Amino acid sequence: MKRIHRSRLILTLLAVLAAVPATAVGAASAEHKAVAAPHVTVRDTTDTTDITGLYQLNANGYTGTLHILSANQGQVQADMRFYALGYDERVSGTWSDTSRTLTLSRPLAGSSKVQTYTLWAGGSNTATSHLMFGGYFTDSSAGHYGTFAEWMWR
């Protein structure tokens, strides 16, 4: 008896979710006829853009790489390497999938200055190979400087 009730309950829930009257689902299953559900597009809000990977970086003409190591629950860990310096620097920040904004803080070695990078994602929402960031950085003592990063590989 429980099995029949659960089956009817599942069919009823599926019918409600698919916006098909429960009587049509019951009739279709009894007669083994297929019932076409209307096309429904649902955006899964837990699904976010995967921004991890290696990017070619240009910050005010200084070239290098940005390697985004992780972007979990909006918290980002990355390494920046400017070719002129020749070593990696650990940076951290945040990623907002809603506004598609990446914000990174880069403490400058040997000083109390911090560069703050504000970058917006552009390119394809689905093809990571077309993901780019563009924006600017500021530091503790000066203005805004143009910055962009183009995805290279994961």
Image (tube, rainbow, N blue to C red):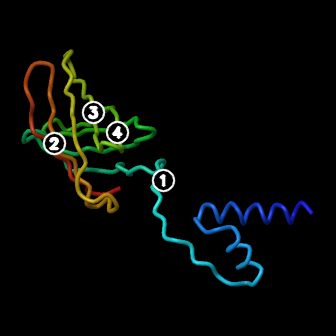
Whole-angstrom CA distance, mark 2 to mark 3, is 19 Å
Q: Nearer the viewer, mark 1 or mark 4?
A: 1
Q: Along the polypeptide, which appears first: circle 2 or circle 1?
A: 1
Left/right placement of residue 27 relative to residue 86 reads right
Of the pair 149 and 120, the residue shown nearer to us: 120
Q: In the image, residue 64 lies at what x, y percent?
A: 18, 44
131 relative to 36, above or below: above
Numbered badge on residue 104:
3
Q: Along the polypeptide, which appears first: circle 4 or circle 3?
A: 4
Q: Along the polypeptide, which appears first: circle 2 or circle 3?
A: 2
Q: Amino acid at mark 1?
A: Asp
| Residue position for label 1 | 44
Q: Amino acid at mark 3?
A: Leu
Q: In the image, residue 42 lies at what x, y percent?
A: 47, 58
Residue at 33 percent of width and 32 percent of height: 93
Whole-angstrom CA distance, mark 3 to mark 1, is 26 Å
